Image (cartoon, helix red, strand yellow):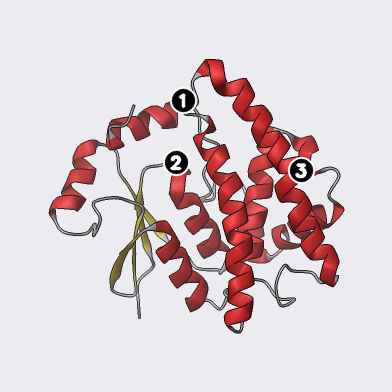
Amino acid sequence: MAGKPKLYYFNGRGRMESIRWLLAAAGVEFEEKFLESAEDLERLRNDGSLVFQQVPMVEIDGMKLVQTRAILNYIASKYKLYGKDIKERALIDMYIEGTADLNEMILLLILTPPEQKDAKFALIKERTANRYFPAFEKALKSHGQDYLVGNRLSRADIHLVELLYEVEELDSNLISNFPLLKALQKRISNLPSVKKFLQPGSQRKPPQDMETLEIARRIFKFK
């Protein structure tokens, strides 16, 4: 019997959080090995675990996978969250890239210099309200189904709901004009595996703050 997937990253959201969400939604229990210092990262590099010298890294099915998209693709394929054919997969990929664009803006907000933060936050709100949320709302409305693609749960729905929660943390009013997104969020959140992940004390990580940013800086040595 294969062991639980093991996730190697620091104890924060970063680029690992979408992997946590996807595994949790698939009902897969996983372990985490937190990096606490630059030396921890260097040990992984030196023992050959990191093909491109960087994390996230996930040990799963006898492999040591790096590169976030490759990890997510494998998990989604393994647990049948990636559509039934190449057309559905193309649509799922398209929606995922949209969520990734906005997610990246939110992820990097904490790194924005103080004098630029208000402008960056305003841009995120504008893009959310006028570009990304309308596109997802239109997609759901166009086919009248419960999920984005193929009327079945896919990784596109999971990543979108993760994003909805992140946006709510910034401004809870941004989702108010999008009833189908609110309904999707409620639908996915009530799935037993996701509901468990959303409970306090789960492996879901809290929003990034200055403390977790300093931990990341110490490990990854960025300014």
Would residue 155 be seen by someone viewing this image from the given angle?
A: no
Residue 185 in the figure: left or right of residue 218? right
Q: Which residue is mark 1?
A: 210
Question: What type is the residue that disc 1 sits on?
Answer: Met
User: Residue 130 bears which disc, if any?
Assistant: 3
User: Residue 12 bears which disc, if any?
Assistant: 2
**How far from the left and from the top, in percent, is residue 109?**
54, 31
The outermost residue toward the bottom is: 85
| 187 is higher (above) or lower (below) than 9 | below
Q: CA distance from mark 1 to mark 3?
A: 29 Å
Residue 185 in the figure: left or right of residue 159? right
Question: What type is the residue that disc 3 sits on?
Answer: Asn
Disc number lying in front (1 or 3): 3
Residue 87 in the figure: left or right of residue 15? right
Instruction: Name the residue at 52% across, 54% down.
Output: 18
Q: Secondary structure at mark 1?
A: helix
| 137 is higher (above) or lower (below) than 87 | above
Disc number lying in front (3 or 2): 3
**How far from the left and from the top, in percent, is residue 146?**
79, 69
Q: CA distance from mark 1 to mark 2?
A: 11 Å
**How far from the left and from the top, in percent, is residue 155?**
59, 66
Q: Secondary structure at mark 3?
A: helix
Q: Earlier in the sequence, mark 1 or mark 2?
A: 2
